[in-house]
Image (tube, coloured by chain):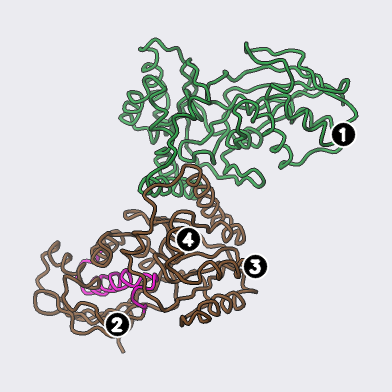
Chain colours: A brown, B green
Amino acid sequence: MNSARAFAPASVGNAGVGFDILGFALDVCGDVVEVSKGEPGVRILSIDGAENLSLIATENTATAGLIRLIEDFALPFGFDVRIKKGIPIGSGLGGSAASAVAGIVAANALLDTRLNTYELIKYALVGESVASGIAHTDNVVPCLLGGLYICDEETPIAIPVPDGVRVVVVHPEMTIKTIDARARLPDAVSLSTVVKQSHFLSTFIASGFLNDAEKFGRACVDLLAEPGRRELISGFDLAKEQVYSAGAWSFSISGSGPTVFALVSEDIERKVEELIVSTFTSQGIACQSWCTSISPKGARIEESQ
Amino acid sequence: MNSARAFAPASVGNAGVGFDILGFALDVCGDVVEVSKGEPGVRILSIDGAENLSLIATENTATAGLIRLIEDFALPFGFDVRIKKGIPIGSGLGGSAASAVAGIVAANALLDTRLNTYELIKYALVGESVASGIAHTDNVVPCLLGGLYICDEETPIAIPVPDGVRVVVVHPEMTIKTIDARARLPDAVSLSTVVKQSHFLSTFIASGFLNDAEKFGRACVDLLAEPGRRELISGFDLAKEQVYSAGAWSFSISGSGPTVFALVSEDIERKVEELIVSTFTSQGIACQSWCTSISPKGARIEESQ
């Protein structure tokens, strides 16, 4: 095989309740990377679906991991790469992770000896670190594997998702840079807040295994990042108030935002979607929105057309 | 029935990794409280096994909850109470919680309409708060119910304990007052420490459900309370170093100490017990020690002799 194309889905880093450690996959959009064997080195032939992304391989999340791969294994060939961005840039939906994952999954299909899961994570993180400066696993792991994970770099742990948990995802079309969002994080957290957050986190994990949708949904609370970041998302507080009144279990920020998500039961998902979208549009902010579930499907090779 | 006697076991508050939210029961020792119907009011007739505990019912953990019970239900009778302390005072093994739980469980057996689990927790917490000033659930819940719990006051969640997890418990005979131990807690914790602790906590909970003894044991790490409290326990650092070298999965403080515990596989439990005990005794500190497991048995009514 001389060419392979991989799709990698959007993902929700932090998953609300698990700052920097939890993440889940969404099958609402994704990035596609096509990799072909070529001359030594890595070249980006095209980028569709986004402007202002670097065509220099060392600076692009989809290709930085491939350069490291060639070095580590002394591969006798290089890669030509075509990128299709399906995840909005700077949306908080894990776009940089998806490009990094799709790149390494496609390249892996061309190797005589395939990488294992741990190695795939490792090389995807090389790409991800180009975007954020720090290699966080909370998008890379669910994007690669699908589902909800404790995103340990070496041995991620899958957490079951209770039946009946629906996810309303709304992307207001504003951009928040990861670096600005990180500047809003507290340096330190009071011990009493740590105890409350730990209670939510442990309840969330246990409720996944106990298949308790409501307890799982209600435990998805973020006392760490949200207090500083919500101010970056115009309309966040109003939307939160409205969706709780409508019966949503939780409302939180996806990754570093501005995308928000609510965990809800199926009977109210359309109502909750409407409320969030109308809150943003009434402020002149256009939205993309989806009613979906935590997707069990991670990155995969697409058949050639 | 005019008289009932209840046994309530020792417990490990915090369970190392879950400061103020997790706790587990130990079947190594416990408190016994005998309650008899009597004249209005609550009287302590005797306390065996401890000196310096108050015989005034409002000031004793075993009886404060009974006073509240009589008030809340306008009971037409009072209680005469005999207390046998089997858990060393100030040991960090949940002695105040055990007396409070045993008192309310015994009294409950004498009521025409029995309290439910939530109410038992509530009245036990009234007693527990006499001892510490604050009503923490992390001893009361496992002491009452047995097992390992996320100690929510209203709906505690049982966490399965993996097969093969053994607990080495060592009580060095020194006393740490809860108030002194709490003074060693940090007011605030760095966000990076919170992320690491959250990772351990979520891995611990998930490993319980996944029946992964080693991962469960290795995740039992306390970055919140231990750094300040270990200095109160002479020999802690040396014992920790030695038991890790011997292959223990973890080593931590029970509640506010001075009791320590290690999670280990069965093949090394005696070796680990020896190492901890010899560390303390070489400093002139006598010890009680046990090789045991997290006990599924909580408080129970004892048959009259």
Q: CA distance from mark 4 to mark 1?
A: 46 Å
Magenta part of the protein: which range? A87-115
Q: Nearer the viewer, residue A170 or A124?
A: A170
What is the CA distance from the residue labelled 2 to the residue labelled 4?
A: 27 Å
Q: Does the magenta run of residues contain B233?
A: no
Q: Position of residue A202 (x, y in %)?
A: 52, 49
Horizontal side of residue B126 vs A238, given as left or right: right
Q: Nearer the viewer, residue A253 or A139?
A: A253
Image quarter of residue B265: top left
Callout 3, which amino acid? Ser
Q: What is the spatial separation of the Cα atoms under label 2 and label 3, in whole angstroms?
A: 37 Å
Q: Which residue is mark 1?
A: B74
Give the percent coordinates (x, y) of residue A26. 45, 72
Disc with the residue nearer the chain's start (4 vs 3): 4
Residue type, mark 2 in image: Ala
Tell me what residue is drawn at x 42 percent, y 71 percent. Answer: A258
Q: Mark 3 — residue?
A: A245
Most extreme residue toward the bottom, as rendered?
A305
Kind of residue at disc 4: Gly
Q: Are the numbered discs 2 and 3 placed on the same chain, yes or no?
A: yes
> On the picture, is B125 further left or further right than A39?
right
